[in-house]
Image (spheres, grey):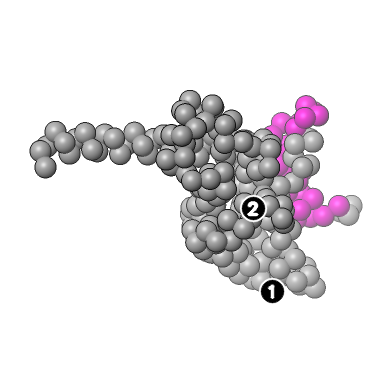
């Protein structure tokens, strides 16, 4: 193959990758704003600035589009968790993960989780990258939860799985949007308040 052909091939691949990233970012934002059911493929194509037929060259269906965005956020979560210090107290790392989740959601970058009967949920269950990422995140958080319970930092009477799902629920917590729409608090204040209700509860201290 001639050098010129290699350069052209490489440039084409870079352009395709850049377009795919633009598609995923657009889908991510739309999933955060309106959810999977309300999002349309036509809307994605229009906002990216490409023809619908070109969109289908990258992703075969609306479900695959949304799954790609979900995988992207899952990988971001994995990267964040991997960067946390292993020697830090488990509760400190758990708070850091929940804080990150709240900040990503407030920034409009957290896709809404699909409903139980959604076709997206079926697609995600069959997506190896997403499921492997979910299992890794769950295992890491679960280990920190159990360690924090053993140290007396979290209520040992609660099943660890209940605490884990409570943390996951922060990724779709409507309280964040309600507080932000009120216009009374800055994002950092909102994050601090929700973190407090999540970890310290509502009882007077």
| Residue receiving disc 2 | 119
- Mark 2 or 1, closer to the camera: 2
Give how far across and how far down residue 88 sits, in percent.
Answer: 56, 61
Residue drawn at x 37%, y 39% as measured from the top left = 17
Residue drawn at x 10%, y 38% as measured from the top left = 2
- Whether residue 6 is visible, yes or no, is yes
Looking at the image, residue 146 sits to the left or right of residue 12; the answer is: right
Looking at the image, residue 11 sits to the left or right of residue 186; the answer is: left
Name the residue nearer the viewer: 34 or 152.
Answer: 34
Name the residue nearer the viewer: 76 or 118.
Answer: 118
Give the SS element for disc 1.
helix
Q: Which mark is residue 194?
A: none
| Circle 1 residues within 10 Å: few <14, some 14–19, many ≥20 | few
Looking at the image, residue 188 sits to the left or right of residue 10; the answer is: right
Establish if 64 lies above or below 132.
Answer: above
Q: State the CA–CA distance, disc 2 to disc 1.
A: 39 Å
Establish if 151 lies above or below 72.
Answer: below
Instruction: Specify the farthest residue to the right.
Output: 204
Whether 172 is among the magenta residues is no
Q: Main secondary structure of the magenta part?
A: helix
Residue drawn at x 65%, y 43% as measured from the top left = 36
Give how far across and how far down residue 184 sits, in percent.
Answer: 79, 28
Give how far across and how far down residue 122 sits, in percent.
Answer: 62, 58
| Circle 2 residues within 10 Å: few <14, some 14–19, many ≥20 | some
Establish if 152 lies above or below 204.
Answer: below
Give how far across and how far down residue 72 sits, in percent.
Answer: 51, 47
Q: Which mark is residue 150?
A: 1
**What segment carries the magenta color?**
180-202
Name the residue nearer the viewer: 179 or 36.
Answer: 36
Whether 199 is among the magenta residues is yes
């Amino acid at each position: 193959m001639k050098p010129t052909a290699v350069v052209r091939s490489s440039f084409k691949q870079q352009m395709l990758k850049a377009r795919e990233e633009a598609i995923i970012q657009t889908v991510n934002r739309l999933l955060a704003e309106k959810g999977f059911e309300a999002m349309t493929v036509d809307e994605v194509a229009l906002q990216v600035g490409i023809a619908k037929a070109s969109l289908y060259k990258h992703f075969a269906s609306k479900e695959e589009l949304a799954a790609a965005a979900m995988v992207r956020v899952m990988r971001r979560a994995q990267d964040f968790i991997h960067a946390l210090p292993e020697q830090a107290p488990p509760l400190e790392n758990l708070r850091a993960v929940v804080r990150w989740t709240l900040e990503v959601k407030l920034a409009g970058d957290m896709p809404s989780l699909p409903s139980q009967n959604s076709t997206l949920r079926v697609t995600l269950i069959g997506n190896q990258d997403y499921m492997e990422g979910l299992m890794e995140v769950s295992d890491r958080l679960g280990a920190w939860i159990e360690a924090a319970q053993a140290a007396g930092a979290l209520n040992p009477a609660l099943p660890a799985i209940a605490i884990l799902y409570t943390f996951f629920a922060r990724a779709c917590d409507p309280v964040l949007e309600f507080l932000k729409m009120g216009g009374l608090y800055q994002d950092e204040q909102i994050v601090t308040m929700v973190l407090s209700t999540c970890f310290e509860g509502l009882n007077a201290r």
